[in-house]
Image (cartoon, helix red, strand yellow):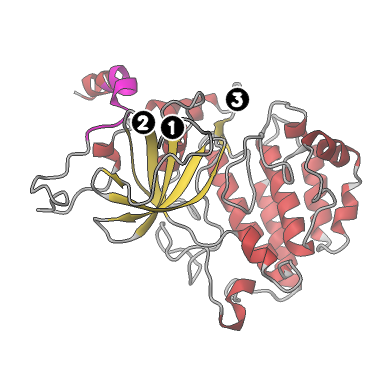
Amino acid sequence: MSGGGEQADILPANYMIKERWKVLKKIGGGGFGEIYEALDMLSHENVALKVESAQQPKQVLKMEVAVLKKLQGKDHVCRFIGCGRNEKFNYVVMQLQGRNLADLRRSQPRGAFTLSTTLRLGKQILESIEAIHSVGFLHRDIKPPRNVAGFRGTVRYASVNAHKNKEMGRHDDLWSLFYMLVEFAVGQLPWRKIKDKEQVGLIKERYDHRMLLKHMPSEFHLFLEHLSILTYFSAPDYQLIMSLFENSMKERGITENEPFDWEKGGTDILLSTSTCTPPQQNTRPTAAMFGVVNITPIPGDLMRENTDDVLQDEHLSDQENAPPILPGRQAEGTGQPVNEAEVWEETDFNRNKLRISISK
């Protein structure tokens, strides 16, 4: 919390926010903020706390909250718990996830997932991407790890458009999914050891992507063909891609309820200990759980009406966004009811005042 160095964490261990969330430890961070594990003193569950400095030039957390709230109730989306701000930082609290998919893949004997795990993860992640696109946003940083990257997408999984700093569309998120699934199944990508993003971009542009599919199901050739014809304005055929995953599973006799690779051998380590959505067809928690990282509106007129609706309807205050306090519940050590009024109210004051007037 102290001033000078860039390396200083925004929050120290044991820091209390709103006398409700107690910081336990830092679990990630990058160009757009820091992520902590915290204890919810109200529900007694461990939660994820994402924080950005109030002095940070590019403020993105408010947008993430808007999108996360819009996605509530959809499959594979983290449960939103609360948000707020003070003079030092902005924050959002959400459902805590377990080990990320990159760590789980590297922990496998071959450093790769079986096709059973890869294909089922592909289905879940595709559903997540489609959900984000459906509310007028791009993810721009589809990847297995949780950490945030300053580049427009993580270099290893970024599309060629991202490397060229071109306007990114829905198909760019799907290119990242394609690269990620190849790495899941094969264990590596040809540019894995190259750090320079320009060099990686040149390799991707010149590389015959069919070479990536040597050890992938034949259906992935159709996945690649579909990606290759998409443009910024094209609507991806999500159902086509889903059917390719499902056909690959059917050919190999893979069922939805098989254990994931990390669940075998007595080490049942799920990415999520609970689901945030109503029960689905899955009989256990889903593995591909999405937080909101590096989200951006789809630019231009492509989905402007949908995007404007998302932002226009947001009233980002703790009082409205945090779950209601249980009857008779008081703030720890105060004897007074918890008051969650201190948040984003300065920036939203005029818009919220207008909303209240209209609703009357």
- Label 3: which secondary element: loop
Q: In the figure, residue 158 lies in which quadrant? A: top right
Residue density around tag 3, few if under 14, some if 14–19, many if 20 or more, within 10 Å: some
Q: Residue at x 85, y 51 (%)?
A: 190
> What is the x, y in percent for residue 326?
17, 54
Type of amino acid under label 2: Lys
Q: Residue at x 56, y 50 (%)?
A: 146
Can residue 5 be seen here? The reply is yes
Quadrant in which the N terminus appears: top left
Label at residue 124: none
- Label 1: which secondary element: strand
Tell me whether circle 1 and circle 2 mark residues in contact (CB < 8 Å). yes
Of the two numbered discs 1 and 3 in the rendering, the one whose residue sits closer to the viewer? 1
> What is the x, y in percent for residue 140?
63, 38
Residue 124 covered by magenta stretch: no
Type of amino acid under label 1: Ser
Relative to 338, does residue 304 appear above or below in the rendering?
A: above
Relative to 32, does residue 103 appear above or below in the rendering?
A: below
Left or right: residue 157 compared with residue 48:
right
Mark 1 or mark 3: which comes first in sequence? Answer: 1
Type of amino acid under label 3: Pro
- Label 2: which secondary element: loop
> What is the x, y in percent for residue 222?
81, 52
> In this figure, which residue is indicated by the disc labeled 2?
88
> In this figure, which residue is indicated by the disc labeled 3?
299
> In this figure, which residue is indicated by the disc labeled 1?
53
- For the record, the magenta segment spans 341-352
